[in-house]
Amino acid sequence: MTIKNHLLGLVQVHQQAYARIFSALEAVSDTDYFADKRLFFSSIHGTLNHCLLVDTLWYFRLLQQRPPFTMTGLDMTLHDTREALQVALSRQAEKLFSFVGHSEDTVLNKTLIVKTSSGMEIHHPVSWLVATVVNHGTHHRGQITAVLTQMGLTFPALDLPFYENLPPAQ
């Protein structure tokens, strides 16, 4: 399997996992959705806002461009409503998929020097940074599924073997 196909699979899972989470969240009232659930970013909404923020920051780092906003903190709110946040997070995941899909292996293997939100300079291949975005989303989706479990709700499987229609192993 090429690195590109591997990454396409990961970012496609990233997209589908968000869709599955949003589907499960339809059963959650606004009161519970916005309530402090003792997550890193307080509520389910705060956690998903953080995911959008970080996905967007990494996307613009991959493009070697500045994001279209000035970050005020990792808890910065990009969208106040769950509907707007869902649309924005889905679109951002689509952008990452498109970025990988349009990138040649030479781009994916290129080492980028980027500064993190804390100002630390890191040197990693683009492929590693794309995987970082997916890993970060996985981490926070896990927190959300823990809250859903505590609420007695069910949600679809998010583990890698439970996704279909992924890019072929070439």
Image: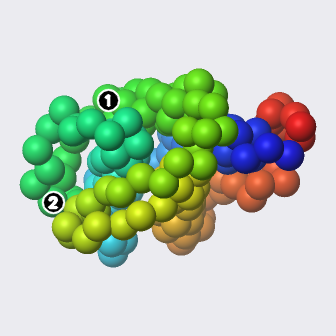
Residue 47 as seen in the image, left or right of residue 169:
left
Q: Between residue 59 and residue 92, name the one nearer to us.
A: 59
The residue identified by callout 1 is 84
In the rendering, at what x and y percent does residue 106 appear?
61, 39
Going from N to C along the chain, the mark reached first, 2 or 1, is 2
Q: CA distance from mark 2 to mark 1?
A: 20 Å
Helix, strand or loop status at disc 2: loop
Q: Residue at x 59, y 24 (%)?
A: 102
The reply, left or right, for residue 81 in relation to residue 141 is: left
Identity, as a three-letter code, of the amino acid under mark 2: Gly
User: Could you tell me residue 7's position as x and y percent?
Assistant: 67, 45
- At which x and y percent is residue 123? 41, 64
Q: Secondary structure at mark 1?
A: helix
Quarter of the figure with residue 114: bottom left
Q: Is residue 98 visible?
A: yes
User: Which residue sits at x=52%, y=30%?
Assistant: 99
Dot 2 alpha-carbon crowd within 10 angstroms: few under 14, some 14 to 19, many 20 or more: few
Crowding around mark 1 (Cα neighbors within 10 Å: few <14, some 14 to 19, many 20+) is few
**Would you place residue 98 above or below residue 22 in this image?**
above
In the image: residue 140, left or right of residue 157: left
Residue in the image at 15% along x and 60% along y: 73
Residue 167: which quarter of the image?
top right
- The numbered mark at residue 10 is none
Q: Position of residue 70 (x, y in %)?
A: 11, 44
Looking at the image, residue 108 sits to the left or right of residue 119; the answer is: right
* Image disc number at residue 73: 2
